[in-house]
Image (cartoon, grey):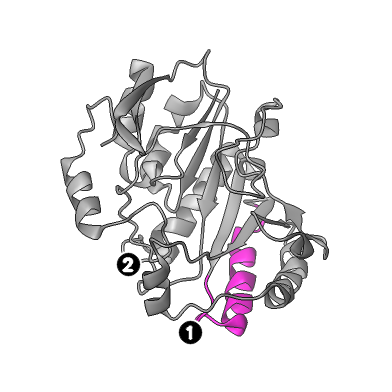
Amino acid sequence: MIISASRRTDIPAFYTGWLLKRLNAGYCLVQNPFNPRQIRRVSLLPEDVGGIVFWTKNAAPILPALAALDKFPYYFQYSVTPYHADIECGLASKRDTVIPAFLTLAKHIGAKRMIWRYDPILMTSKYNYSYHISAFSRLCELLEGSTEKCVISFAIAYKSIAKSLREAGHQELNITEKIKLAESMLPIAKDCGISLCACCELPELYQPGIQPASCVDSAMFGGNAPRDKNQRKGCNCAASVDIGAYNSCMNGCVYCYANHAKTQVEQNYLGHDSDGELLI
């Protein structure tokens, strides 16, 4: 069994204390987001866990606790994006916290287990083509040697976030525009020893040499788990159990599909009990 921690919220950034207590207890409870009355007990015993995939935008809070993770195989999907507080209002400083934590974590676990996510890509008058190329180049230079793979994807105007994206000025790119940007990014990444991958994009995007991503990759744990049928079309992720909860991430990203109401997010965060069996 692969544990995903978590597509639904940033556990390393905001809920490390809870995670450590649940790992020590050997289990947690997970509520079905579509049926709140359905609660599942998930084993977190080392013999039951084939691997853990951590998703985060800030690993600084979990760095002091890495020794507690030694009994598990794991890797990080670590987002470092080029946006400011107008897009990610709750995120810690990239210069002072996010990127230093990335570099420190890579020294502990190795570049291979650090998957850099430059996603989602928003295109606005401020964050335009030239901005992305310049920002991506700078980040490649900063992260060179600390990661071997970068995953890109383009923002999707899901119903729950369509209004937020419109207010941010996002304009969805067509496939030709996506290919143009990806083709420009490809040699920049390659020059820094980073392979460029894409998540759930049209087949045409992969023709220039970009590889399809498997964000939950069982091969990283030496296995060959079946594809997760619950994910969207084009997703190559292996089946996993997500132990997070929606409406609980405090990063404040306007493109986040996992938060649906700011007041609910704040209430859930304030009501979080690090001793609880459930995250929220």
On the image, the x and y values in percent for residue 37 come to: 27, 28
Callout 2: helix, strand or loop?
Answer: loop
Amino acid type, mark 1: Lys
Q: CA distance from mark 2 to mark 1?
A: 16 Å
Would residue 125 be counted in the magenta stretch?
yes
Pinpoint residue 17: horizontal percent, then vertical percent.
Answer: 29, 34
**Outermost residue to the bottom:** 125
The answer to whether residue 55 is left or right of residue 260 is right
Image quadrant where one finds the N terminus: top right
**Residue that label 2 marks:** 89
Identified at 73% across, 72% down, the residue is: 179
Vertical arrangement, residue 188 with respect to residue 16, above or below: below
Q: Nearer the viewer, residue 214 or 257?
A: 257
Three-letter residue code for mark 2: Cys
Magenta-span inclusion, residue 7: no
Disc 1 designates what residue?
A: 126
- Which picture quadrant has residue 95? bottom left
In which quadrant of the rendered view does residue 254 lie? bottom left
Category of crowding for the residue at label 2, using alpha-carbon neighbours closer than 10 angstroms: few (below 14), some (14–19), many (at least 20): some
Q: Residue at x 46, y 62 (%)?
A: 158
- Residue 219: give x, y in percent of width and height: 70, 32
- For the C terminus, the image quarter is top left
Q: Which residues are magenta?
A: 122-145
Between disc 2 and disc 1, whose residue precedes? 2
The residue shown at (39%, 46%) is 10
**Secondary structure under the numbered disc 1 in the rendered image:** loop
Looking at the image, residue 263 sits to the left or right of residue 206; the answer is left
Q: What residue is at 35 percent from the left and 31 percent from the top?
A: 19
